[in-house]
């Protein structure tokens, strides 16, 4: 489930309805719920996520060298 979907679902369940009067306090509540949902996703990633490269994402040595050369050439031209 994507983050905007989570925000929408949680907003509806926590707020019970969209802001009808469109007052500042109602919108503050909407943005608070949206930021809490986003923060909770970040905390879950921090707790269980990993930045280790997966075996399926590894590049063979020859391809890696070619990519480095292409990057250096792009840097020189820029």
Image (spheres, rainbow, N blue to C red):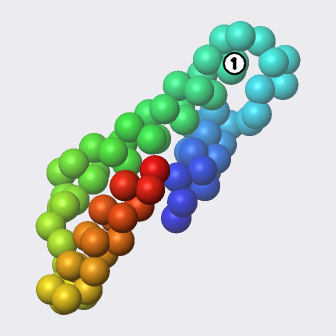
Label 1 neighbour load within 10 Å: few <14, some 14-19, many 20+: some
Q: Is residue 11 left or right of residue 76?
A: right
- Residue 20, position in %: x, y? 84, 25
Instruction: Residue 73 in the image: state x and y as whole percent.
Output: 36, 64
Q: Is residue 53 visible?
A: yes
Residue reaching furthest right?
A: 21
| Rendering coords of residue 70 (x, y %) | 35, 71
User: Which residue is more in the foreground, 40 or 57?
Assistant: 57
Q: Which residue sits furthest front?
A: 77
Whether 27 is drawn above or below 15: the answer is: above
Corner quadrant of residue 63: bottom left
Camera-side residue: 14 or 58? 58
Q: Position of residue 65 (x, y in %)?
A: 21, 79
Residue position for label 1: 26
Q: Is residue 11 left or right of residue 62?
A: right
Could you tell me which residue is drawn at 52 percent across and 52 percent down?
3
Which residue does the image show at 21% across and 48% down from the upper left?
46
């Amino acid at each position: 489930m994507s983050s905007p979907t989570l925000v929408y679902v949680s907003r509806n369940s926590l707020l019970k309805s969209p802001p009808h009067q469109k007052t500042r306090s109602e919108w503050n509540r909407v943005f608070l719920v949206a930021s809490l949902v986003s923060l909770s996703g970040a905390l879950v990633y921090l707790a269980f996520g990993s930045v280790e490269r997966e075996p399926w994402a590894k590049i063979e040595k020859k391809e890696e060298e070619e990519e480095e050369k292409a990057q250096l050439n792009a840097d020189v031209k820029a």
